[in-house]
Amino acid sequence: MTAARLTHELTADLKRAGLEDFYRDLHRHPELSMSEHRTSATLAARLRAAGYETTEAVGVTGVVGVLRNGEGPTVMLRGDMDALPVQEATGLAYASEHDGVMHACGHDLHVTWLVGAAETLAAGRDTWSGTLVIVGQPGEETGEGARAMVADGLHTRFPRPDAVFGQHVAPGPKGLYSHTPGLTMSASTEVDIVIHGTGGHGSRPESTVDPIVTAAYVVTRLQAVVAREIAAKDSAVLTVGRFHAGSKNNIIPAEARLGLTLRSQSPRVQQQLVAGIRRMVAGECSAAGCARPPEITVGNEFPVTVNDAALDQKVAAVHTEVFGAGSVFDFGPAMGSEDFSRLAPDGVPYDFWHVPATPDSTWSAAPGADLEEKFGNVPGNHSPLFAPDPAVITPGVQAMVAAALTVLA
């Protein structure tokens, strides 16, 4: 029996209502990166009930479930668990109950898919042979989680996978599945900057070195790093996402702080971006006469995600068979970033794809003549309005099951 037909057979009696309740519960109780204690405990309980050897606290709050089912290959399925410091504005009946914290990137849906796939494959274990490794990963949003799990023995304490699979919810019309062989997600680097001025009274700016003015020049100047230093053939994004300074209207503060994110599709371009930032920030601070040089700290980094082309084509073909002609498309490399690839040991192929989940009414109402125009006009990941349609729970489970069965069946 083909992987596609077996997927339909195993998911024919999928308990969608129970999974939807599970999803809504996770959405109500989001937890920030590396603090996913309730989420990981809930996942671990479901895996144990399904017959998995389950280990908690792998890489702080990570969960690993292992199901050994005879001779054969080993497949790893991953779902990330953390939420974001975002105030939810969806108005959903099951909106976050935690002020200022929201599953704005859909990781609650990822955990639901993971549970559904794990339970489905465990219930149908007489149809396949091999080993399943289920990974509930913490801290994807901060880039800490995959690294922490690997450091805690993911590749040595548990069966080594022959293939690693993951999927991510995205804005877009339901019923589509985005597969990109090769480069699919970009590298990302966080940079924190502290500009040291000389504080004083707002009535006497001449006696100060105003770090707010200097920081404002830095923000403007940094736009030239991409516009004038990165070749047009190379994709790059530099975003200033945080600007903190001051405490009162009539006080010129002593310092200003900026938080940046850099994204590109190669390590070389990432290095160019960091070098340009260091030079321009130092130059602006020197021109302003700052009391001392700026502090520039390179923080969390995400690697590029490069799908194994042969594995991606194989999974895409099975997804086409499961969901129908025209359901699979190649959106091309995205500027978003992931730490998923760190879960694959060196030399092990992996595949990562996207599942659009915008509610039909939202998609229909969005302005735009084609998919790309409408895509930019619906709430996306990290938006306080991001609200995936729970109708994608069943097909999302099917997509993960089908991918696993391309290797196990």
Image (spheres, rainbow, N blue to C red):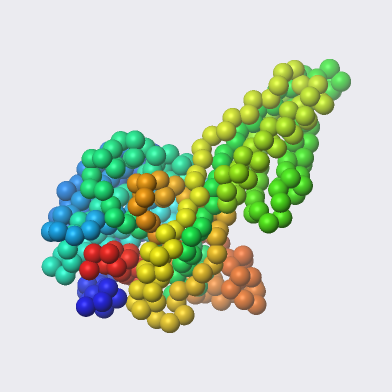
Q: Who's the residue at 86% across and 20% down the image?
A: 206
In the displayed orientation, state which residue is furthest to the right: 206
Q: Is residue 301 left or right of residue 251?
A: left
Q: Using the rendered view, name the quadrant where residue 334 is placed.
A: bottom right
- Measured as percent of width and height from the top left, residue 193 is found at 64, 31
Q: Is residue 387 left or right of residue 70?
A: right
In the displayed orientation, state which residue is furthest to the bottom: 325
Query: In which quadrant of the rendered image does the C terminus lie?
Result: bottom left
Mark yes or no: residue 239 visible: no
Q: Nearer the viewer, residue 252 or 65?
A: 65
- Measured as percent of width and height from the top left, residue 147 is found at 39, 39
Q: Nearer the viewer, residue 396 or 205?
A: 396
Q: Who's the residue at 23% across and 40% down the image?
A: 157
Mark yes or no: residue 140 visible: yes
Q: Is residue 405 above or below residue 270?
A: below
Q: Who's the residue at 84% across and 17% down the image?
A: 207
Query: In which quadrant of the rendered image does the N terminus lie?
Result: bottom left
Q: Is residue 137 above or below residue 288?
A: below
Q: Is residue 409 above or below residue 132?
A: below
Q: Is residue 213 left or right of residue 73?
A: right
- Measured as percent of width and height from the top left, residue 269 is found at 63, 45
Q: Using the rendered view, name the quadrant where residue 253 is placed.
A: top right
- Measured as percent of width and height from the top left, residue 11 is found at 25, 72
Q: How many marks?
A: 0
Q: Who's the residue at 45% across and 77% down the image?
A: 327
